[in-house]
Every structure is written in structure tokens, then in C-alpha cells.
Amino acid sequence: QVQLVESGGGLVQAGGSLRLSCTASGSTFSRMSLGWFRQAPGKEREFVAGINWGGGSTLYADSVKGRFTISRDNVKNSVYLQMNSLKPEDTAIYYCAAATGVYILRSRQNYPYWGQGTQVTVSS
């Protein structure tokens, strides 16, 4: 069983930056594909970014490409989401997710493990 705990959310003005962290329990972290998703009020949970087990490959939603960066530290059992040039439309609850496997997974249905979420609010 894997437990994920996110941190780093908060309130920021448009154009600002935040760094989200997600720390996992369990010994299989280095063999897991990781992702960040977000859910705004009244909307479906959507894929934001993903990273493969080794950290050598990443994938981003078009809406965040060039502004967000996903990374991982397998020694610290952690995954990060650096968010720059934030926009009001980035406001959402952000979730990290994990799945056993090598490749990046874009669909939320492929992730069995989820954190509790952290709120990000971007004011205009």
C-alpha cells in the first residue's frame, strides 16, 4: 500500500509561483509512475503532468506546458510540481497520484494511489 501526502499549496497572485511537494510511503516508489492532477469547482479532475519511474521522461497538459515542471527524487520518495507564471484558471485542488509501472500514465483511471489534495488559489 502506498500513501501520498501533498503540501505546498496556497494563495498567490497571478504571475507568481508555487512549488507543490508530494511524499510517499512504501518501498516501491522508485518503480512507480507519478502524476499530478487538478480539479476545479464543477469540473472533472484533469491531468496536469506525469513523470516516468526513472524521471527521464515527462508529459504535460497543453494548458501548463512551458510554465509547470514535474520532477522526482527517488531517494526522498518525493515528486514535485514547480508552477510558474500562474494564472487564475490554474486555481484548483491539486492531487498527486502513483501507479506501479514504467511508463507515464495520463488517464486518472490508471492510478490506484492518490493523495488528499492541496488547494492552489491564484488571484487576478
Image: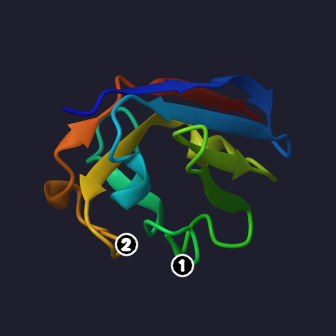
Residue 116 at x, y = what percent?
A: 35, 23
Q: Nearer the viewer, residue 74 or 4?
A: 74
Residue 45 sits above or below residue 4 on the image: below
Q: Nearer the viewer, residue 15 or 30?
A: 30
Q: Give me the C-alpha separation between circle 1 and circle 2.
A: 8 Å
Does any portion of residue 33 appear in the rendered image? no
Residue 90 as seen in the image, left or right of residue 19: left
Say whether disc 1 or disc 2 marks the residue closer to the N-terminus: 1
Residue 84 at x, y = what percent?
A: 79, 51
CB contact under 8 Å: marks 1 and 2: yes
Residue 106 at x, y = what percent?
A: 31, 68
**Residue matched to label 2:** 104
Q: Residue at x 39, y 47 (%)?
A: 29
Residue 62 as seen in the image, left or right of residue 50: right
Q: Amino acid at mark 1?
A: Ser
How many labels sit on residues? 2
Q: What element does badge 1 sit on?
A: loop
Does any portion of residue 92 appear in the rendered image? yes
Q: Amino acid at mark 2?
A: Ile
**Residue matched to label 1:** 57
Q: Nearer the viewer, residue 63 or 50?
A: 50
Residue 41 at x, y = what percent?
A: 36, 32
Q: How would you rate the neighbour count of disc 2 (Cα within 10 Å): few for under 14, some for 14-19, many for 20 or more? A: many
Q: What element does badge 2 sit on?
A: loop
Q: Residue at x 35, y 39 (%)?
A: 27
Residue 111 as seen in the image, left or right of residue 80: left
Quadrant that contains the N terminus: top left
Q: Residue at x 32, y 47 (%)?
A: 28
